[in-house]
Image (cartoon, helix red, strand yellow):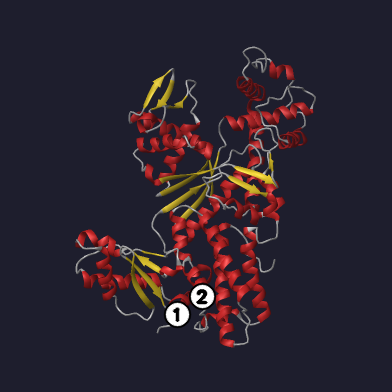
Amino acid sequence: MSSQPLEIKTHLADLLRAALASVAPGTTAEIQLERPRDASHGDFASNLAMQLARALKENPRKIAERLVHELPRSPWLLKAEVAGAGFINFTVAPAAKTAVVAAVLAKGDDYGRGAQKPGKLQVEFVSANPTGPLHVGHGRGAAYGASLASLLAFAGHEVCREYYVNDAGRQMDILAVSTWLRYLDSFGEKIPFPPNAYQGDYVRDMAQQVRDAHGDRYLHPAAAVLACVPPADGEGADIEAHLDGLIAAAKDLLGEEWHYIHQHALSEQLADCRADLEEYGVHFDCWFSERSLYDTGMVAKAVAELEKRGHLYMQDGAKWFRSTAFGDEKDRVVQRENGLYTYFASDIAYHWNKFERGFTRIVDIWGADHHGYIPRVKGALKALDLDAEALDVALVQFVSLFRGTEKVSMSTRAGSYVTLRELRQEVGNDACRFFYLLRKQDQSLDFDLDLAKSQSNDNPVYYVQYAHARVCSVLAQWGGDATTLATTDLAPLASERELALAAKLAAFPEMIEGAARDHAPHSVAFWLRDLAAEFHAWYNAERLLVDDAAQKQARLALAVAVRQVIRNGLRLLGVSAPDAM
């Protein structure tokens, strides 16, 4: 029997293909092999006979019996049996299972990596307005997006990680005027601070930076600021109109110097965001500026193209996109009566730009509150004759923090929310990244702070990392050279636990492929937890450093393979694999 590592699933598919050629010459079918949930049903199962039943006009169980009879002999196959309505269950030889150990040790960090796939794929995530510190909700989007991008790259895709910087529009104006109002306040110019402006201490910090650098250069009397601003209270008052009035007053009084306040606030918050994400282990290949879409004329071009194609109409002085023609609940304004473009117009231009840059697949990761945005963006792509199906939108649900049974309160502009940095400082990056992936991204998440900090087997990230550290500890006790284990005779691996552990390792590449296809990095977290459980059960039941040299070497090789696969999986999730706990 060959001792070379074997793709047993591919081998079984080849055996079935040969049997099919004997049973029904000229007939083709997609060979599907699944791992049964019940180990008593064998290692793999195929429904090939049921696929053929209609074409061959025969009972699927009879077809299955004929296929089994015609299977070529193979030293890797222990037995093949017909079950149920016509399934074929395969039980492979122990050597076929343990061969994966040699494959893992040979491929190392590349074990599980998929073949290179065609096309360029973009994952755009976080993309939070740079108007304040990232909060725990952004942290979940960052963990999901970074892990998904790493997973897709590992599965063989060419991936670009992108952050869309919303550096144009009203929210940045609100941040700038919030900073300026705090700056005026520091000089005693008392203007009631709007409740819908940005409240956090970071705004005062930016105001102080402006004062430290430029003194009273941007100082204007409160009376001058409020002269033409609509009231914030009283009958008929509109707090949004009041805030817009303050912005207009700031632009008028400051003139060109408004751009300094605006740029300072943007630069400070964007730099803080970058630093926070870098410390979190989240890196981007491209930071794309919304402002650049205006500067290059891309927004105007997109609106003009939609108008040329007959997808816009005028109403009340504004230009509307007929998004209802593409499944949206109502039509959407792209250019207001004052000539300014809407956020939606720049979003259309941005997505058109993605196609112009050659991306063949686009993954956008948005907060769950943007659900209604999907039909209008896809509708705009269709209207521009672009492939709307190439755009996948993953929605990330909200996060609730709990300390014990007590929920930690959060808010937005009020500045009292829990920041991502605070969460990381409390529980650590590893727990942050892993815990965020313990539920599918489109399900709400309760984040247990106490559990995330605990050093116990109840803490899933600790449990997985402990399996890695345990192998390191055993190797240190052994004192040998782990690289010599790559050529170890694996025949002594014969116990039920050892064979199950080897089978689990063999399933890693197909798990990666499935998780990448389904955009489901949480599957990797769940799978690693299961692998750690199987390893801990084996470790607790059987000694690794036994007296028998051959058995010791084989068990150490299996342990090192487990360590390698845990390390490969944790790397995709942005979680460290410590040598000691």
Name the spot of residue 514 as percent of width and height, x first: 44, 58
Q: Residue at x 49, y 83 (%)?
A: 491
Numbered mark located on residue 496 in the image: 2
- Give the residue furthest to the front: 84
Depicted 66 relative to depicted 417: above or below: below
Name the spot of residue 415 as percent of width and height, x first: 69, 35
Amino acid carrying mark 1 in the image: Ala
Find the distance from the CA under tag 2 to the CA under tag 1.
Answer: 13 Å
Secondary structure at numbered mark 1: helix
Viewer-proximal residue, 263 or 155?
A: 155
Which residue position holds label 1? 95
Numbered mark located on residue 577 in the image: none
Name the spot of residue 580 as percent of width and height, x first: 69, 68
Viewer-proximal residue, 243 or 434?
A: 434
Q: Is residue 403 visible?
A: yes
Viewer-proximal residue, 365 or 121?
A: 365
How packed mark 2 is, by other alpha carbons closer than 10 Å (few <14, some 14-19, many 20 or more), is few
Marked residue nearer the N-terminal end (2 or 1): 1
Q: How many marks?
A: 2
Q: Check the picture and name the quadrant holding the C terminus.
A: bottom right
Secondary structure at numbered mark 2: helix
Marks 2 and 1: which is nearer the front? 2
Name the spot of residue 286 as percent of width and height, x first: 53, 49
The part of the image, by quadrant, that contains residue 20 is bottom left
> In the shown orientation, is residue 491 left or right of residue 415?
left
